[in-house]
Every structure is written in structure tokens, then in C-alpha cells.
Image (spheres, rainbow, N blue to C red):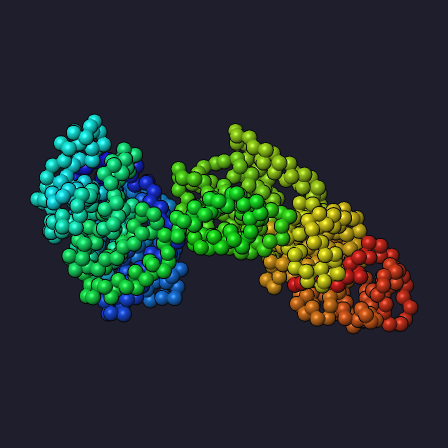
Amino acid sequence: MIADAKANSRTKGQVSGGNESSLKRSRLAPLTAAAWADAIVNFWRSADASSMIDRSQTLDIFDLWPGCGETAWLLMNALHRRLQVFPELAQRLRYLVVAPNRDTLNAIRAQKEFQLWIANESLVPVLWDPDRGEPCLLTPRKRFAWEATNPVVVLANDVWARLDQRLLAVHYGALLEADIGALANKQSDEEEAKLWFPAREQGLPAGLSPLLRECLLRFNSVPLPLPIGAIEMATRVTGLSKRGYLMLASADGTFTEQQMRLQTFPSLVERHRKGEAMPVNFYLLAKYFERLGAAAWQSEAAPGKVIQAVVGTLPRPHRILDPVQASLSNKNCGDAAALLKLARTATGWSRPPSESILALLRSTDFDPEVFVECTGAIMEILKPDTTVDRAPWREALQQIWQRHLPLPGTRPLHRMLAPALMRAGSWGYARSVLQRGLQIHGNDALDFAHLAWCEFRTGRLVEARKWIHRALSMPEKHATVTEVAEKIEDKLQRLHGGWLQTVPSSRMPVICLEPLDMLHAEALHQQYRDPQIAIMTGLPALTTLDATREWVNGHSTDSGRRAYAVMHVDHGFLGYACMAVSGTIAYFCFWIGADYQGLGFAAEIARLTCELGIRQGMTHIYTSAYADNARSLRSLERSGFTRLPIRALPPDHDRIFLFLQGAGAPVLDPEADLIAYYRDEKLPLKFPDRIAVVGRAHSGCHEHAQQNDAARA
């Protein structure tokens, strides 16, 4: 089991114990995970270039401290991203999560996020008690002993400090030892002097005694923590890796002679009193591995935190270590901690710049901890009245969730991330994040309300009502729950059929139409930010949210217009469609939002809206598009519209008019009807002289007929 950080008694080197220990977290920052993944790939590529890799066999990663699985989650994802360009290595990757008991392994196997990897055996639980036998692989098919068939990567993130350490000291030519627990409880300096005794060298691993004698020559009086548990465990694991290994380790520690000289006895005693382990002596570890013929490199990953890479049991290990060292150096693993500190200042920014926060997230490889610190700033950036481009934010927020392993008893990140995703318009992803959060952390009224809001803002009113009913049934009360419930019920009461209904598409089930109302104004304002929409439709610029709200209010309450929001099951507001109705004649207008143009929605939106109009009694539907708006013209023709040969006189001769007739509708002269409409409404367009036509009453079509209504497809 893990050695108590306060104890000095020897342990045999197990890395995890019972169920409580198995659930301990060992966080590896995403930026560090990316650097480690790069180092691992370069290790294998370098070994492969030297003909040391058998491509028919697995490339194993032996994780000595899987904890809750967070390191495995981050590293596996980082490795898959890195190995996309090296498919010959990717298909042989196998991540071994090692523990001495089944409780730890079962907890990892139960994680939904790991089950696909476990099923295809790219992640395999390994049962191994170093005191009792050899590692045993527990695959879905069978149980069998592990044997290294290629150079192995051994991971010891936050491992060595968990194992036994002895406190030695060099004191003017003498090698002494003391129990740090006794030192922490000493009552006087005289008592402390009696606690030190000559160090015991018998039973030390071969090669360690000469290193200790070397320290007597290099130092005057310094504490000398001896990582005996780390040495024993590393020796055992590397002994199993007969075809070579790369060992990556990280822990609080020292690695230079200067750091060892500056380390004080009181600082070690104070750490012990706080329940912290002694810093790991990576200096001694490096010297020990080098005596065994390995190549070692170590550096400071963060203040007080050391990262060490060791390559051994391979010819020319320094040559293999060089690209590993380059990866760990170039990736600046130490920046993760510094950037996290910088993120903590984001809450004080009065006007947080979007690009700066995004750059910070990218620089930390989308670290969830950085997101937590920046949440307030991000929510400010994504306020409804801003027209900041949401697309990079949707991508960034999704990347953050992909680097988070949701675990019981940990911070419910979904409750911070889902609202940001909703503000970014990533409703489908917010929905999945909330559902996973509920699975891990249990029922919560606010989570149910947020799920209801996701469904409400994506046109799924029936599902929204189900979720809000679950929220209302919970004992805890939230103002948000009440507010969401009121909005859902208000909309449902207004949808009483006819033109006022939600209209799903059977051909494209991800979209639907719902009557436009003020709740769509914020999303409409965001999607309308492309100035070409106003230019191509002739609609107002709507440069402010207030102007947009005023426009939406006018269109949603105008009895002559049947205005609809086009809703997507994952993206929410997609675009706008409208029928300007006069008797049984309608003029059709639509546009697609800035983020969703060119994705194939236009023809179905036109078809769906016109079918609704025909069901509501429209016999003839007109529309128009500029002659150079090829995408809209194609979409309209695919949806059933036919071009009319008639053109308006200059300066309006650059638009194409189209016509759609409902099944069973009376046959009429569409050109004559169109001319009559413009004449009777006293609209500015003029047409060439032709046979006189009977005028029609087309009240309510005025605005749409003088605009180029079929907008960006």
C-alpha cells in the first residue's frame, strides 16, 4: 500500500492500496499530458528508426498510478491526437492501468469514457501486487501474464513521493539517519541531536552505497532524502521491461546540487507536520539509473515540481533520450502552473478580451482548471448583447470537456460548462454535458432546468416540459426553475395550431419551425451579424440588440406576416423564414444565420415553410432572389419553385422572380398576378408593359415584395 507521508517505516513498494486509495486523484495538466504524449511518440519513433520496434506487437504504456483514471484519460486522448499522423504506431498502442487490487481497476472499468477503449483492448486493466507475482492483464477475453514485447513506457506521475523514503543527512563527513516523525515531535535541540544515528547501508540496492559515499565528498551538511521505495519499484518495473524502457516521473522534489544545498531540515520537518511527503531526491535517482547504464534527464516542471525522463536497457540510450528531452523542453510543461495563476486574475478584468481568454485556453491545451478560473470572464464575453464570434468558443468549450473526466465526489464541472456552452449556442453539446453530469453527480433541480432550457431553445418543447416537470418535483427550489417553467408554459399556451405551431421536418429531423417571438431575439441578433444578410435581403441592418428586439417584436405581432424561427436540435436558432400573407397568396422570405450558411439547410427550410403555407390555405407563393445569388436560386428550385421569365425594369432588373403553386390550386397567370400585386400595393418596382391584368388585394406583402427575400442559402 502507499506509504504514509508521515511515516519512515520501510514498505515493499505497492503503489495503490484499498478502495479509498484507489480513488485518490493524481492530476496531470492537459499541457503536461500533451508534452508527455509528444515525448512518448518520439521515443517510439526513435526506437523504431533504430529497428528496436516489432510492429506486429503492442506498444505498451505501464501506468503505475492510475488513480481515478484522469492521467489515462488525458494521455490517451493526447496520444490519439498525436498519432493521427503515425497510424502504424496508433494501431499498436496499449495503455495498461496497473493496480494491486480489483477495486481500483473496477472503478476505472466502470467509467463510461473508458469502455470503448477497454472493449478494443487499447486500454487494459493490469492486476499487479509487486510483492506477490507478475503483472496480470485482465482483458475482456481472458486473463494472462504480461510480457513486454517492445520498449515500454513506464509512467510514474505523482508516484515516487507516495512510496517509502528515508531521511539521511550528510554532516561534515558523516552519513547520518533519523526518523522524521521523531524530529517533528522533538522538544529541544539537545533531544534532536540524540535522534540522529549512523545511517544503515546494509540491504540497500546494489550501486546505491557508492552514491551515498560520493555525496559525502560533494556536500558539507545537507539533508539527504533517500527515495528507497522509488528505487525498489523502478528497479522491479524496469526489470520486467527487458526490451527497453522510457520512464516518465514527476513529483515535488530536487534535482540539482544547488537545490539540495538550499534544502533545510526545518523545511522537511514542516512538510511532515502538514502531512506532506519529503521532496523526492531526483538527483540521487538520476545518478542511480546512470550507474545502471541508463540515460537520465530532469528539469523543473513548475516551482518545486520535477519531471524526469529515463531511457534504459537500450543501445545508445542518450541518442534515444534526445528527442524525448526535446519534447519535454519545447512543450514548456512548467507553463501550465504559471498560466493557471494568470487565469486566476481574469475575474478582475472589467472588459475581458475574447481573443486573450481564448489564447490563454489554447496555451494551456484547454485546461479545465483554467476554464474554472476564467468562467466569470467567459460568461461576460458571451453575453447576449455581444456579437463576438461564437464558433471558436464552441470549439474551445468542447475541447475543455474532452479533457475532463467526470468523477463522483469531484467538482461538478458540467454546472459551470453547460451555461457557457448554451451562451455559445452549442445547445446539443450542453445537453450531453448535463446528462453526463446527472449520471455522475445525481439528480439536481438546476441541472434538470438547464436541460429543459436546452430543449426549449432547440424547438423540442415536449422534451422541455418533461425535464422541467422533473425539476419542479425536486425538493430544492430555484428561481431559475420557476422562470424556465413559466417560459415553457407560456409558449405552449400560445401554440394552438394553424399558423401557430411547431413544424418538424420528416425529411431532415434535426430542424423545425417555430413561431418567432421575443425569446429568439438574442440568437437572431447573433446570427444576423453577417452584413451580407441585410444586403441580400433588403432588411434593416439591426446593428444593436435593442434594434433587433424591436424588429422581432414588429414581425412576430404583425397579423400579415407568419414569421418563424428555424430551430436546430443541436445548434438552436438557425435562421428566419416568413410568409407575408394576403388572402390565399403569400410572399416567401428566408435567410440562414452567419454560422450555418452553406450547410445544406436552405432547400428544406423553403420546402417546410411552403408546405405549411399550403396546408394553411395558400394557393400561390412568390419569392425572389438577386440574379447573382446562385445558392439561393438553386435552393429555391430544389424546394419546388419555378423561375418566372419576367424581369422588373432598371434599376431592379437584377432580381429573379419565382413561383410555387399548391396542389389543386386554380391555374392563373403568375406573371400577371405578380404585376398586379406590385401595382395594387403601390410598390416601387416597375415592369414592362403587357396585357392589362385584374388587380388583387395583397395587403401585408408590402415589405417582403420590395426586398430580395430568398437570402443566403
20 and 295: which is toward the camera: 295
Q: Position of residue 457 (x, y in %)?
A: 61, 46
**Residue 276 visible in the picture:** yes
Residue at the outermost left position: 202
Q: Position of residue 578 (x, y in %)?
A: 73, 55
Left or right: residue 102 versus residue 699 is: left
Q: Is residue 689 above or below residue 466?
A: below
Residue at position x 21%, y 60% from top?
295
Left or right: residue 207 versus residue 38 is: left
Residue at position x 48%, y 36% from top?
443
**Quadrant (top left, top right, bottom left, bottom right) of the C terminus:** bottom right
Q: Is residue 395 above or below residue 263?
A: below
43 and 325: which is toward the camera: 325
Q: Where on the picture, by quarter, is residue 674?
A: bottom right
Q: Where on the picture, by quarter, is residue 107?
A: top left
Q: Position of residue 654 (x, y in %)?
A: 77, 71
Residue at position x 19%, y 59% from top?
294
Q: Position of residue 418 (x, y in %)?
A: 52, 45
Left or right: residue 529 versus residue 283 is: right
Residue at position x 66%, y 67% from top?
631
Left or right: residue 29 versus residue 509 is: left
372 and 633: which is toward the camera: 372
